[in-house]
Image: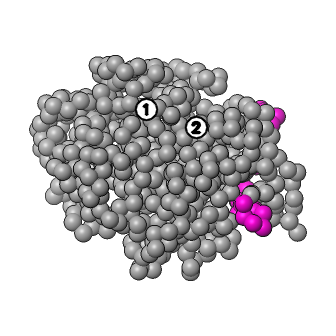
Amino acid sequence: MTIVKNKVDAVIVGMGWTGAIMAKELTDAGLNVVCLERGPDRDTQPDFAYPRVVDELEGSVHRKYLQSLNKETVTIRHGVNDTAVPYRQMGSFKPGTGVGGAGSHWSGCHFRALPEDFKVRSNVEQRYGKKFIPKDMTIQDFPVSYEDLEPHFDHFEYVCGTSGKAGVLNGKIIEGGNPFEGSRSREFALPPNPNYLGGELFYKAAREMGYNPYPIPASNASGPYVNPYGCQMGPCNFCGFCSDYGCLNYSKASPNACIMPVLRGRKGFELRTLAQVLKVNLTDDKKKATGVTYLDAQGRETEQPADIVLLCAFSLFNVHLMLLSGIGVPYDPVSNTGTIGRNYSYQNLNRVSLFFDDTVHANQFMGIGGGGTTIDDLNGNRNDSTKSGFIGGGIVWARQPGGGPVRGIATAPGVPNWGSAWKKGVKEAFRHSFYYEVQGSCMAYQDAYLSLDPTYKDGFGRPLLRMTFDWHDNEIKASQYLVEKASDMCKVLGPKAIKGDAKKDGDHYNVTQYQSTHTCGGAIMGSDPKTSALNRYLQSWDVSNVFAPGANAFPQNNGYNPTGMVGALTYWCAKAVRELYLKNPGPLVQA
């Protein structure tokens, strides 16, 4: 028999960045909020405490902080005529679980989108003409602008204690920052982190090529800091355990360190962990949500009634819940109709490794997740698509999040994969090599989408989410172009060897190899309910008391990491709920 809980003002699904932000904002407004997190509770102490957290086997092999795939995963195929198979081992992307979600194990790179990233389709059409966009490319403009989100970008950076250097401050270009960024209303919360050797050499190489290097905006604190919520952070000690791990030092921004200390003592907030949400409950006409059904920590089916439902899970699983619950019309790639599952996109990521002799000491065992150096000279409007051959853009960066023997040590070209020669190659490479990465945008296409799998079910008897995705010529050309530019820049430094991994013509998406956790789209925001699942306030066009902030809202992905954009959009959504929806519940934008 289903347990029915007392009705609350709002129920939140997931307790990562978006869930924590929404819980803070809505309890600030006086609402009673229940948050349902499928994983365990986690906090810096004791879960990320030294020395256990700095365990490569536990963090990078056993995947302690990531979602377990034995009960809930996705199936993946390259094309609409292929048969999808389950994602059984962590490879291409790493969904988090537990309080903090992927916001606990992220690296800390914290960018703002460029102003032109919000108007991708109209920008391309104005620069090159409508016919320049391939017929199967379904890119769209965001229904919001950089100017709309600037206050929210700013606030999220200050919540995170982001370290960096402004490039454009109140319309004025500032030396040392990114001269191509959107104008900021104030400086970063903290100055940039100290650089590592590869980052310093990146400055040298980039400047010799005529580029404009600047410090990567990093939510890894460069000094002691107290955020606007009164949460204290300590300076990063470069331990090299950011990516895949929770921070032991209160240095890397996370929901655990930056928001949860406030929420945990708040009367209007209740957190229920080990709570697996199964579906959003709807009225018979599917116009309104009445709450959610979930399995509690004891495995009992439970219903949580609520006036507002906020889908704040990992982007893929926000889409999954919408499909399972019958929110909106599932996307059909043949007719190019429907909205739920539409415009799935990913991130284009490649690496260029540099190997030196023993006079160059890189010390890979040290690291900081978001720190380093980057350039925007190939990103946004700096990319001339008529010359590069692709729509979009990307960045090249020098970043050293930390390495070790269990996580793997790259070796120079020609070194075998085993034996004494491999051991010699590892010894030479570990302290005398580093890498630069190119991270590019990923456009959306008619045949790249999310749907329910017709064959496979999860541990709760529900159809798995099916991902249909492969690289298109545009992204392959982008990979080749950006890696070539990065390799040319690296030659300035005179390494004894360079190894790049640009995609080759005809390459397929390889789900077994980690690339990034930047899965985007599937329930996108837009101005037209026929081609988007959410309106400009992240509100469902179809069920007006359901909101779904997250990277699922991106119509396509830009050249940056999505977290800064996700945070800004969530604060934008929360503001709309507080100032517009609560005063007059219903659609905030007329279809």
Q: Amino acid at mark 1?
A: Ala
Mark 1 crowdedness (10 Å alpha carbons): few <14, some 14-19, many ≥20: many
Mark sitting on residue 406: none
Q: Is residue 214 visible?
A: no
Could you say where residue 181 lies in the image, as x and y percent from the top left?
35, 31
The quarter in which the C terminus is drawn is bottom right
Frontmost residue, 591 versus 490? 591
Q: Amino acid at mark 2?
A: Trp
Q: Is residue 212 above or below residue 569?
A: above
Q: Is residue 47 left or right of residue 179?
A: right
Query: Quick one: SS at disc 1?
Result: loop
Mark sitting on residue 572: 2
User: Toward which corner of the image does residue 27 lie, by quadrant?
Assistant: top right
Query: Quick one: SS at disc 2?
Result: helix
Could you say where residue 437 lies in the image, as x and y percent from the top left?
29, 45
Residue, x 74% and y 41% (percent of image)? 584
Of mark 1 and mark 2, the one earlier in the sequence is: 1
Q: Which residues are magenta?
A: 264-287
Please tell me whether residue 374 belongs to the stretch shown in magenta: no
Q: Is residue 247 above or below residue 589?
A: above
Residue, x 69% and y 34% (percent of image)? 579
Mark 2 crowdedness (10 Å alpha carbons): few <14, some 14-19, many ≥20: many
Please tell me whether residue 268 belongs to the stretch shown in magenta: yes
Q: Is residue 210 left or right of residue 568?
A: left
Residue, x 58% and y 60% (percent of image)? 319
Q: Which residue is mark 1?
A: 218
Q: Is residue 448 visible?
A: yes
Rendered image coloring scheme: one colour
C-beta proximity under 8 Å, tags 1 and 2: no
